[in-house]
Image: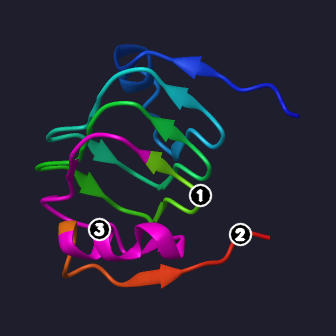
Amino acid sequence: MPEVNVLSGEEARKKILEGGLNFADATIKGNLWFTNATIKGDIDFTDVTIKGDLDLAGATIEGNLALAGATIKGILDFSTLKGPAKIYVSPDLAQIVHLAAPNVPLAVTKKS
């Protein structure tokens, strides 16, 4: 089993990069708030566990958002100012993500 990074919501928020965000396989102990942030690349939440909310309200996301295999225990707010271009999601999250971001194309992926 690979080592899993454990981050608080505040630690995760500090990891915004010009090229995007990669939180794949991480466990986030709190909320992730990217309110009004600009993310100039993809966001990878593949197989992430977020024990709180995921808030992208007012954010600009210039890339894609990967949520395949993600577990989000809180509220999803995808009321972004712009983007993402596409959301990659596993079947169990597809309906919830579509309701949270009805105007963003979804790509439903299967876990291998």
Q: Is residue 7 magenta?
A: no
Q: Quadrant of residue 26?
A: top right
Q: Amino acid at mark 3?
A: Ile
Relative to 11, say whether 84 is above or below.
below
Near-viewer residue (54 or 81): 54
Quadrant of the image for the C terminus? bottom right
Q: Residue furthest right?
A: 1
Residue 69 image label: 1
Point out residue 104 in the picture as x, y percentages from the top left corner.
Answer: 28, 79
Near-viewer residue (43 or 68): 68
> For mark 2, what is the residue?
111
Q: CA distance from mark 1 to mark 2?
A: 7 Å
Compare marks 3 and 1 and give the one earlier in the sequence. 1
Give the residue at x 51% y 38%: 49
- Characterize the local packing of mark 1: few (<14), some (14-19) or many (20 or more) Cα atoms within 10 angstroms: many
Quadrant of the image for the N terminus? top right
Q: Secondary structure at mark 3?
A: helix
Near-viewer residue (89 or 96): 96
The region drawn magenta spans 72-99
Near-viewer residue (32 or 13): 32
Q: Quadrant of residue 65?
A: bottom left
Query: As drawn, is 83 to the left or to the right of 40?
Result: left
Point out residue 23 in the picture as x, y percentages from the top left corner.
Answer: 57, 38
Answer yes or no: do the residues labelled 1 and 2 have beta carbons within 8 Å?
yes
Q: CA distance from mark 2 to mark 3?
A: 18 Å
Q: Secondary structure at mark 2?
A: loop
> For mark 3, what is the residue?
96
Relative to 36, say whether 59 is above or below.
below
